[in-house]
Image: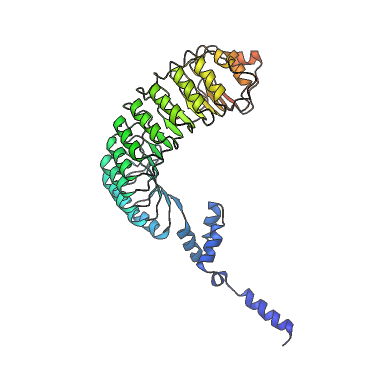
């Protein structure tokens, strides 16, 4: 037989080889792992049933609106799912929504789950949370914001069963008390992010308990927890001194200088601080904070801090050169002098968002001075500032960065960075 005919036979054999016969499941999984976009991964599953099965078993994330029957099918198909999003929006919720029966299916079917989003799933109760705690021991992130039927009993079961919990969002869970913080302290030592916004039954005792066991917290949101004071906040500052990066205290009117001084003393890694409505915070405390956190502070909201004046604001602007977002709305004692005190010899500011609404003593002159130092400004809020008008800017010949939006009357949507 000639060499040409032998080569032709080999080519015919090669042409007849099916890729499904040539590649093992592990080799196909390796190929799938190199596919970058979710769209292309979905396309991978359209080739044949085998590829669809492999694509399904390798899928890590899923957002769904489904009842128990469909969830069971999903659990059989997506066996390695890590993240499940069942959140409902306020405007597009469906009836009856996620129920305790659904949570039972999830706990028994998605055993590899690490991230579960149940935001605004108002139908779930402590019964469902107990099942989650018993079935999802690997869970690291749980969002049950606005699940208004939940109490300490159900959430404590989650804390007890999900000991590797890192992120917990409880915004609007009005029945939550200090007991859940005690449960977290005892069981969830790796907790890094806790959101308790609007949980008005939380007190200093709860924060002290939390600080005794959870000392790796990076983000703590206790906005509108009106029963929290300096004592509780200071305990968190001391316990989480090396980790705390974000602290939100909006409308915690009992918080004052002691908490700010604790932040200055212990938390020089702080990046975001919200103290809007903390009316007892003084100039001197904010100066110490600015000096201590000058290298890392990026976002500062202190609207309605009525004791803030030119002295502390100029210190903040001079010291915190990496500050990107600043809100001093309703700080009525601030004047143009705060901006005049910034040395011309210092480098430019990093500010991208500046809110000075309802500051009657700030004028076009002050904004003009600041503008000369802010080449990255993207949003400026000057609502209800009687001495700052569009005509005034035009008359002065000020030139804002091309990307900068100026809110004179509330017609522009506010950035959500400091909520």
Horizontally, is 292 left or right of 187 in the view? right
Give x and y (percent) for residue 279. Answer: 40, 19
Residue 219 appears in which quarter of the rendering?
Answer: top left
Quadrant of the frame with the N terminus? bottom right
Q: Depth check: give the residue in front, 385 or 283.
A: 283
Quadrant of the frame with the C terminus? top left
Residue appearing at x 27%, y 38% in the figure? 179
Give x and y (percent) for residue 31. Answer: 56, 61
Q: Depth check: give the residue in front, 302 or 255.
A: 255
Horizontally, is 253 left or right of 33 in the view? left
Classify 51 as above or below 404: below
Residue appearing at x 38%, y 57% in the figure? 75
Horizontally, is 45 left or right of 213 in the view? right
Horizontally, is 325 left or right of 95 in the view? right
Q: How many marks?
A: 0
Give x and y (percent) for residue 36. Answer: 56, 53
């Amino acid at each position: 037989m000639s060499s040409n005919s032998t080569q032709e036979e080999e080519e015919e054999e090669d042409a007849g080889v099916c890729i499904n016969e040539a590649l093992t499941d592990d080799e196909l999984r390796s190929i799938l792992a190199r596919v970058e976009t979710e769209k292309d991964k979905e396309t991978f599953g359209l080739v044949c049933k085998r590829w669809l099965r492999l694509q399904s078993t390798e899928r890590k994330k899923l957002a769904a609106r489904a009842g128990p029957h469909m969830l069971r099918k999903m659990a059989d198909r997506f066996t390695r799912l890590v993240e499940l999003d069942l959140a409902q929006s306020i405007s597009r919720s469906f009836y009856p929504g996620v129920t305790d029966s659904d949570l039972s299916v999830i706990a028994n079917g998605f055993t590899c789950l690490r991230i579960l989003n149940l935001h605004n799933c108002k139908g779930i109760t402590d019964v469902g949370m107990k099942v989650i705690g018993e079935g999802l021991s690997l869970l690291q992130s749980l969002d049950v914001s606005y699940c208004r039927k939940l109490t300490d009993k159900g959430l404590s079961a989650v804390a007890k069963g999900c000991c590797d919990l890192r992120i917990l969002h409880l915004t609007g869970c009005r029945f939550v008390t200090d007991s859940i913080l005690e449960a977290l302290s005892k069981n969830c030592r790796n907790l890094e992010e806790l959101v308790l916004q609007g949980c008005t039954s939380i007190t200093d005792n709860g924060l002290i308990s939390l600080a005794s066991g959870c000392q790796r917290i990076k983000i703590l949101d206790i906005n509108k927890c009106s029963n929290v004071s300096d004592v509780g906040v200071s305990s968190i500052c001391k316990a989480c001194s090396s980790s705390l990066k974000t602290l939100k205290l909006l409308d915690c009117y009992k918080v004052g200088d002691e908490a700010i001084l604790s932040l200055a003393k212990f938390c020089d890694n702080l990046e975001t601080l919200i103290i809007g409505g903390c009316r007892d915070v003084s100039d001197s405390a904010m100066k110490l904070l600015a000096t201590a956190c000058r290298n890392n502070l990026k976002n500062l909201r202190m609207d309605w801090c009525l004791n803030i004046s030119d002295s502390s604001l100029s210190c903040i602007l001079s010291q915190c050169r990496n500050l990107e977002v600043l809100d001093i709305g309703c700080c009525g004692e601030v004047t143009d002098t705060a901006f005049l005190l910034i040395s011309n010899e210092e480098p430019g500011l990093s500010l991208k968002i500046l809110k000075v609404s309802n500051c009657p003593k700030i004028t076009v002159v002050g904004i003009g001075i600041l503008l000369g130092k802010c080449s990255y400004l993207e949003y400026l809020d000057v609502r209800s500032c009687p001495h700052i008008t569009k005509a005034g800017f035009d008359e002065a010949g000020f030139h804002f960065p091309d990307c900068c939006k100026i809110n004179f009357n509330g017609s522009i949507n506010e950035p959500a960075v400091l909520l």
